Every structure is written in structure tokens, then in C-alpha cells.
Image (cartoon, rainbow, N blue to C red):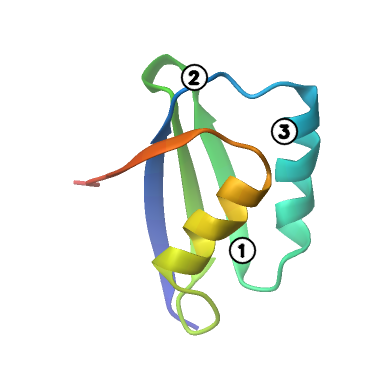
Amino acid sequence: MTPLDIAYRYGRVPGPREMQAMSALMEVYGVRKLRFEEAAKAVHVEFDASRLNEDSIASLLRNTGLDLKEKLTLA
């Protein structure tokens, strides 16, 4: 297993429908943790890089209805 973290900024604040879809992401094999940072309008995802890649994580997030804007650089 190769754990990685990735973060994206989002535009529109997710509503109940998007949040419910986000909770279903925890059922995706390889997604380990989701964390929202409301003040920065960012979502952080910890995932297994041997199962998923950055493009697949972005696609999964977009499919929930989340308004993704840009990938953030983590320090």
C-alpha cells in the first residue's frame, strides 16, 4: 500500500445531496479518508496510490457534484 494525500479547492459549498454522495466515497476501494476544510474551501483525500491515481480521485469527487476548482499543493 502506498498512501498519498491530495487536496482540491472547491467553489460552491456542497449541499446535502453532495455530502451524501461524498460519504459514499468511503466505500470506494482505496479511498482511506476525506476531510473538509471549510474556511479554505478545500477537501483533502487520503488514498492508496497502488489502487487509485490523482485523476481517478478528481473524477470521483466531480461525480459527487462537488464544484472542484483546482488542485492544491500540500507542504
Q: CA distance from mark 2 to mark 3?
A: 14 Å
**In this rendering, the label closer to the viewer, 2 or 3:** 3
Residue 9's spot in the image, x, y percent? Answer: 38, 33
| Number of numbered callouts drawn | 3
Secondary structure beneath label 1: strand
Do labels 2 and 3 touch, CB within 8 Å?
no
Left or right for 66, reference 75: right
Residue 12's spot in the image, x, y percent? Answer: 53, 20
The residue labelled by disc 1 is 31
- Residue depicted at x 48% and y 84%: 50
Earlier-in-chain disc, 2 versus 3: 3
Q: Relative to 13, say whether 69 is above or below.
A: below
The amino acid at mark 3 is: Glu
Earlier-in-chain disc, 3 versus 1: 3
The residue labelled by disc 2 is 38
Q: Relative to 23, say whether 2 is above or below.
A: below
- Residue depicted at x 38% and y 45%: 7
Residue 59's spot in the image, x, y percent? Answer: 54, 58
Do labels 3 and 1 touch, CB within 8 Å?
no
The residue labelled by disc 3 is 18
- Residue depicted at x 48% and y 55%: 58
Secondary structure beneath label 3: helix
The amino acid at mark 2 is: Glu
- Residue depicted at x 62% and y 72%: 30
Q: CA distance from mark 2 to mark 1?
A: 20 Å
Q: Relative to 3, say whether 13 is above or below.
A: above
